[in-house]
Image (spheres, grey):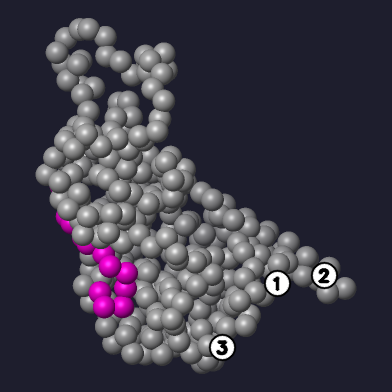
Amino acid sequence: MEEEEVNRCQIQEWYPKFKSVSFKTLIHQLPESFIQYLLDDSGPFLLPDSVLNEDALPNRIHNPDEEEDFQVSEGSGDEAEASAPPSFPELELKIKDFIESLGGAVFPKLNWSAPKDSAWISTSGTLRCISFSEIALLFRASDSLVHDLCHAYDSCQDKSSTRPQNFFLALRKWYPSLQPDMEFRCFVRNQKLIGISQREVTTFYPVLLEKKNDLLFLIQAFFINHVRAKFESENYTFDVYITKDDRVKIVDFNPWGAFTLSLLFTWDELDHIHSEGNDVEFRIVEDRCAVRPGLKTAVPFDYLDTSPGSGWDQFLRNADEELRRQSTGAGA
């Protein structure tokens, strides 16, 4: 894998080309001062001062006894200044305008990743945000974003830096009615669509058994008509969502292999499918015994280290063996 392949998967790179077939998104370059704020772990957990007086946790109960550890005792001006919360007024006002133009609620992400691991800290338990303060809270509490900030190029053969030159905030319109059973990961090898996997592998959805052939046709046609000639990499994956009226929407692009999850495939299988020249293989969870264990981790779901010999590689091998055992037992 090369850096340019990873760079093409940044949302600010691919979204302008696929805007008409994706979810409405507004993108803004982040100031370096905000990136340094996200990376700073030298002091207490401080949220930025809001020029709009918006609280990221409006329903929290303030307990002075619990806040004593974060108070700065009277002393030198340097001590007090060191613990003063940062402020990003221009960024906050820009984000406020974006949120309003996107209907009042958004899903935030950086160049590649969203702060999935910190959803628990929000008032809704999701990544739905209505203010800059909520976005800052999710980003500051997330370990997932460390991938974007520090390790985006770790798998690149021509790695020349640890991070991109610029970071971007992507705010995507929040759609509360989206259903996880209609999201799929598509695998492209040598510009040929060779595999499709159910994206949420922790659940059995009976509707997918009924609609599998129709869904396959929709995704194949979408790839041929909208993706193949526009995305410049030879090998990559892309995620799509299929709406109730059978429109296909691009959710994201990811590099081939490395930290991208192969879901119901293995990367070896995908290479074999390509070498045999078979038609597109579409895999779904076809019964409850084949459900994969949930992968609730502190790193992005799409960028787990599942390389041979890694801890997650062994975990998934053990999970596959257990699934085969269960399937054999169920058929006995």
Q: Residue at x 25, y 70 (%)?
A: 15
Where's residue 101, x and y in %? 21, 59
Q: CA distance from mark 3 to mark 1?
A: 17 Å
Query: Decide: marks 3, 1 in contact (CB < 8 A)?
Result: no
Disc 1 to disc 2, C-alpha distance: 11 Å
Secondary structure under tag 1 reads loop
Residue 265 picture location, percent across and down: 56, 73
The residue lying toward the viewer, choosing from 147 and 327, is 327
Query: Along the polypeptide, which appears first: circle 2 or circle 3?
Result: 3
Determine if the magenta segment contains residue 25: yes
Q: Secondary structure at mark 2?
A: helix
Image depth: mark 1 or mark 2 in front: 1
Label 2 sits on residue:
330
Q: Quadrant of residue 90?
A: top left
* Number of marks: 3
Q: Which residue is mark 1?
A: 287
Query: How many C-alpha atoms fall within 10 Å of the one at disc 2: few (<14), some, or many (≥20)?
Result: few
Q: Which residues are magenta?
A: 19-31
Check the image and report above or below for 166 versus 157: above
Circles 1, 2 touching at the beta carbon (< 8 Å): yes
In the rendered structure, are the residues bearing label 2 and label 3 in contact, judged by CB atoms less than 8 Å apart? Answer: no
Q: Residue at x 47, y 57 (%)?
A: 301
- In front of the other: 164 or 27: 27
At x 33%, y 63%, the residue is: 156
Counting residues from the N terminus, which is met first, the one under dot 3 or under dot 1?
Answer: 3
Q: Which residue is mark 3?
A: 213
Q: Residues within 10 Å of mark 3 (few under 14, many from 20)?
A: few
Image coords of residue 29 (percent x, y): 17, 55
Three-letter residue code for mark 2: Ala
Please name the amino acid that badge 1 sits on. Asp
Query: Is tag 1's residue or tag 2's residue first in the polypeptide sequence?
Result: 1
